[in-house]
Amino acid sequence: MVREKTKGVFVDWRWVVAVLAVVLVVSNGYWFWKWRDQYRVLRIIDGDTLVIKTGDRVRLMGMDAPEMGNCNALESKTELERITLGKIIKIDRDSRDVWGRRLGVVYVGTKNVNLEMVRQGLARYDNFLGETGQEIKQAGEAAQKEKMGIYNDVCLEKKDKCVILGNIDQSTGKKYYHLPNCYSYGKVKITSSRGEKVFCSEKEAEDEGFNLAP
């Protein structure tokens, strides 16, 4: 045993090293937990977007939930709250879009939240080619076959009446809505993550700041 006598007191340096090691482990554990806590979900925007403790908005990749006010939008938001609110999430394939939002596949523990939302018919599969892309696509097809969530008869009937496409010109930022008889209607693609929407009436589109396409 190595001891050092200092003013009549023997110091066992093995105990000193052990105490320092414990302090180091506890300190690292604290900072690791504090870092993880930054990914705690504080708020849900809608069925595919949430806010974490850092203030970042996180958009669930590979799926598209209905915009608030549309059929089953509230149910979609409520389910995302049930799964994630107040919990610490992991963001896989983490990236950012042009609006600064974080994009990714969100996990709570081992649960793939993106997959779960599509499986319940509370969001549709949206052209995702990642590792779980095929699984999400198949889950969406199954939900559609079973007429779950957004694929139920009520939502589908409403969707048939909502055919006005609200598109945003990416070069100018101008908002236009396109009627089914517009020349360019068949070429318009709606991307909800950019703020583009489908409307049920011209008034609804105009109230959102969209003008009739020239």
Image (spheres, rainbow, N blue to C red):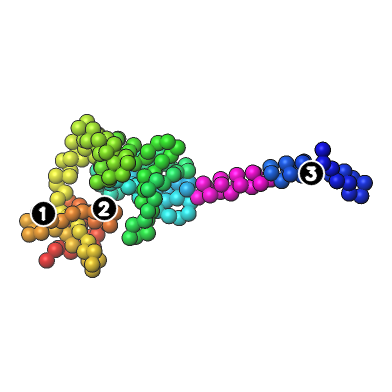
Tell me the element at label 1: helix
Which residue bears the numbered disc 2?
192
Mark 3 crowd level (few <14, some 14–19, many ≥20, 10 Å Cα)? few
Q: Position of residue 155 (x, y in %)?
A: 20, 40
Q: What's the residue at 17%, 51% (across, down)? A: 200
Specify the principal SS of the magenta part: helix
Which of the pair 201/89 is nearer the observer?
Answer: 89
Res. 119 image quadrant: top left
Q: Quadrant of the N terminus?
A: top right
Which badge, 1 or 2, is on the more N-terminal residue? Answer: 1
Residue 11 counted in the magenta span: no
Please tell me whether mark 2 or mark 3 is closer to you in this view: 3
Boundaries of the magenta span: 23-38
Q: CA distance from mark 1 to mark 2?
A: 17 Å
Residue occupying the far top of the picture? 146
Q: Amino acid at mark 3?
A: Trp
The residue that mark 3 highlights is 13
- Label 2 element class: helix
Amino acid residing under circle 1: Gly
Q: On the rendered structure, is 191 left or right of 43?
A: left
Marks 2 and 3, the one that precedes in the sequence: 3
